[in-house]
């Protein structure tokens, strides 16, 4: 296959739409997920950009935001007209600190799973207290998420024997090899999907919190926000829309999650005006 043919979908995704004179940037951050690049992200989210563009009568261009500092700066300066990002605390700060407006969150919501090995004598969350726990890096969003869930259930992670590991797959390794008695992983992670597929035991599921939120600059009108929400809500109602959702890896969009997203930082314990996640 020629280079032109391989690049044709990318070229079509970038081509201006006849009759649209307004250009908007949709910044997409997938956290620390590896194995991707700008071209793949444009193709992955090109259908979403087209749906948003149709609702706004504008050309929406996807921009891959690899670095968190770049995402923060894009919101702070308003260079990003729209942003869809994980970890979720970044869009939450976009609402709180930079005047962005809520558009939607991805379905399903995110959770922290507390997992234990098969045959574990630990049968309830309160029995985790005093046990060795494996968790993602302490600076990561999911570590903060799981620590908050434990804290809200009377367990202080800072007073536990916690081993922090770089990858969530390593959490599973520590549990299955007996290095820790419990572990904490994200419900939407590959580690969680494999754990469930292999029949792993989930001891506790946290409260749900918004996942992969989309926010918009403050200068969008209420009518434009409503138009985008309508377009996103209707994606699951058509084969083309389903293809867009499948490409992104979600089941749909929730336009009713604004209150939960706005309280997320307080729930995490980010009451100092910061609490920026350094990792996914």
Image: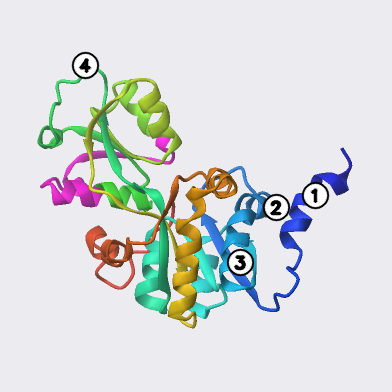
Secondary structure beneath label 3? helix
In the current view of this chain or complex, which residue is farthest to the right?
Answer: 2
Task: Quadrant for residue 22, please give it.
Answer: bottom right
Q: Distance between the Cα atoms at labels 4 and 2?
A: 46 Å
Return the residue at label 4.
119
In the current view of this chain or complex, which residue is farthest to the front?
Answer: 238
Q: Viewer-proximal residue, 155 or 26?
A: 26
Q: Distance between the Cα atoms at labels 4 and 1?
A: 51 Å
Q: Give the foreground label among 3 and 1.
A: 3
Q: Are marks 1 and 2 in contact (CB under 8 Å)?
A: no
Return the residue at label 2.
39
Q: Earlier in the sequence, mark 4 or mark 1?
A: 1
Magenta residues span 147-168
Number of numbered discs: 4
Q: Earlier in the sequence, mark 1 or mark 2?
A: 1
Q: Give the foreground label among 3 and 2.
A: 3
Q: Position of residue 109 (x, y in %)?
A: 34, 49
In the current view of this chain or complex, which residue is farthest to the top?
Answer: 119
At x 48%, y 56%, the residue is: 234
Return the residue at label 1.
7
Tell me the crowding category of disc 2: few under 14, some 14 to 19, or many 20 or more residues within 10 angstroms, Cα based. Answer: few
Can you tell which mark lies on residue 54? 3
């Amino acid at each position: 296959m020629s280079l032109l043919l391989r690049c044709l979908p990318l070229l079509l995704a970038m081509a201006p739409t006849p009759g649209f004179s307004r250009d908007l940037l949709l910044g997409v951050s997938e956290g620390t997920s590896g194995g991707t690049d700008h071209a793949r992200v444009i193709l992955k989210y090109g259908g979403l950009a087209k749906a948003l563009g149709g609702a706004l009568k504008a050309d929406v261009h996807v921009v891959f935001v690899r670095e968190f500092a770049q995402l923060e700066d894009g919101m702070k300066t308003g260079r990003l007209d729209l942003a869809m990002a994980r970890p979720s605390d970044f869009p939450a700060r976009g609402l709180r600190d930079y005047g962005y407006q809520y558009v939607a969150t991805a379905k399903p919501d995110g959770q922290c799973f507390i997992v234990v090995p098969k045959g574990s004598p630990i049968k309830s969350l309160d029995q985790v207290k005093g046990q060795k726990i494996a968790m993602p890096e302490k600076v990561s969003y999911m570590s903060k998420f799981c620590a908050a869930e434990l804290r809200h259930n009377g367990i202080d992670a800072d007073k536990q024997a916690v081993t922090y590991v770089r990858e969530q797959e390593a959490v599973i390794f520590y549990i299955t090899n007996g290095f820790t008695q419990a572990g904490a992983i994200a419900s939407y992670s590959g580690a969680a999907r494999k754990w469930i597929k292999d029949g792993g035991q989930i001891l506790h599921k946290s409260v749900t919190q918004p996942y992969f939120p989309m926010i918009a600059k403050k200068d969008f009108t209420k009518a434009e926000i409503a138009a985008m929400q309508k377009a996103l809500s209707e994606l699951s109602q058509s084969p083309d829309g389903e293809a867009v959702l499948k490409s992104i890896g979600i089941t749909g969009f929730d336009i009713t999650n604004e209150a939960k997203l706005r309280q997320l930082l307080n729930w995490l314990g980010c009451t100092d005006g910061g609490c920026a996640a350094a990792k996914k």
